[in-house]
């Protein structure tokens, strides 16, 4: 009885709890889900990632993204029906602008990856494709360490963008399977 009398004495708490419960039911009932959660086809449960640099940042981050989407990433192509083959990765830096002293004031960063998806028979399910991300940032020659840190943060964001583009291509596997079924 103590608990009931305490809750009656705090109507604001009850109202807050009921509001939170209603919001949770509303969000779950409308089919809301995290961004990117629907980007992986339901039939893609296991995938092998083949790359020249399996410990590289792109392949490592891609593996993490796939695992968080519920896809098991295998070390061997024998354990999977499909292989995502990263053919090439490139990181480029170009001068985007110079100041009045003819010194670099902006740099353009370019991250690029080419890939394809093949099945066990070696058939290309996704033909060789290139994903690219480009960004321009202010280069400060007076604070090189901060500029290098900023460049690395931007490259991390760019890799996330490449991974998102690759996952978007993987969605085509669902579309291809749906078209073949009909």
Image (cartoon, rainbow, N blue to C red):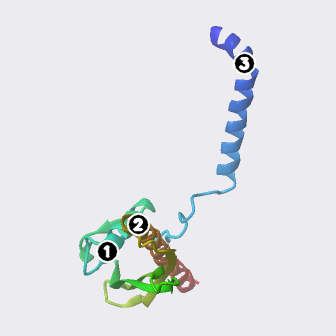
Location of residue 40 in the rendering, given as x and y in whole percent from the top left corner: 49, 70
On the image, numbered disc 2 is attached to which residue?
143
Residue at (68, 13) in percent of width and height? 6
On the image, numbered disc 1 is attached to which residue?
48
Q: Earlier in the sequence, mark 1 or mark 2?
A: 1
Location of residue 68 in the rendering, given as x and y in whole percent from the top left corner: 43, 60
Location of residue 140 in the rendering, given as x and y in whole percent from the top left corner: 45, 71
As helix, strand or loop, the secondary structure at mark 3 comes to loop
Give 112 or 167, whichever is nearer the viewer. 112
Q: Earlier in the sequence, mark 3 or mark 2?
A: 3
As helix, strand or loop, the secondary structure at mark 2 comes to loop
Query: Gap in Å between the C-alphas at discs 1 and 3?
Result: 56 Å
Give 15 or 147, whichever is nearer the viewer. 147
Q: Earlier in the sequence, mark 1 or mark 3?
A: 3
**Crowdedness near tag 1: few (<14), some (14–19) or many (≥20) residues, C-alpha within 10 Å:** many
On the image, numbered disc 3 is attached to which residue?
10
């Amino acid at each position: 009885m103590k608990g009931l009398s305490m809750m009656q004495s705090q109507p604001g708490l009850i109202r807050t709890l009921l509001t939170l419960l209603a919001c949770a039911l509303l969000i779950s009932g409308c089919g809301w889900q995290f961004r990117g959660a629907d980007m992986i086809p339901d039939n893609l449960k296991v995938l092998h990632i083949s790359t020249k640099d399996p410990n590289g940042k792109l392949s490592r981050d891609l593996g993490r993204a796939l695992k968080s989407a519920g896809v098991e990433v295998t070390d061997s192509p024998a354990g999977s029906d499909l292989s995502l083959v990263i053919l090439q990765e490139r990181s480029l830096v170009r001068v985007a602008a110079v100041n009045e002293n003819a010194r670099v004031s902006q740099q353009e960063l370019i991250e690029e990856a080419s890939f394809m998806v093949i099945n066990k028979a070696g058939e290309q399910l996704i033909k060789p494709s290139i994903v690219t991300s480009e960004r321009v940032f202010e280069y400060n020659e007076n604070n090189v360490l901060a500029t290098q840190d900023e460049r690395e943060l931007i490259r991390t964001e760019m890799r996330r963008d490449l991974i998102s583009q690759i996952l978007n291509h993987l969605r085509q596997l669902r579309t291809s399977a749906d078209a073949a079924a009909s």
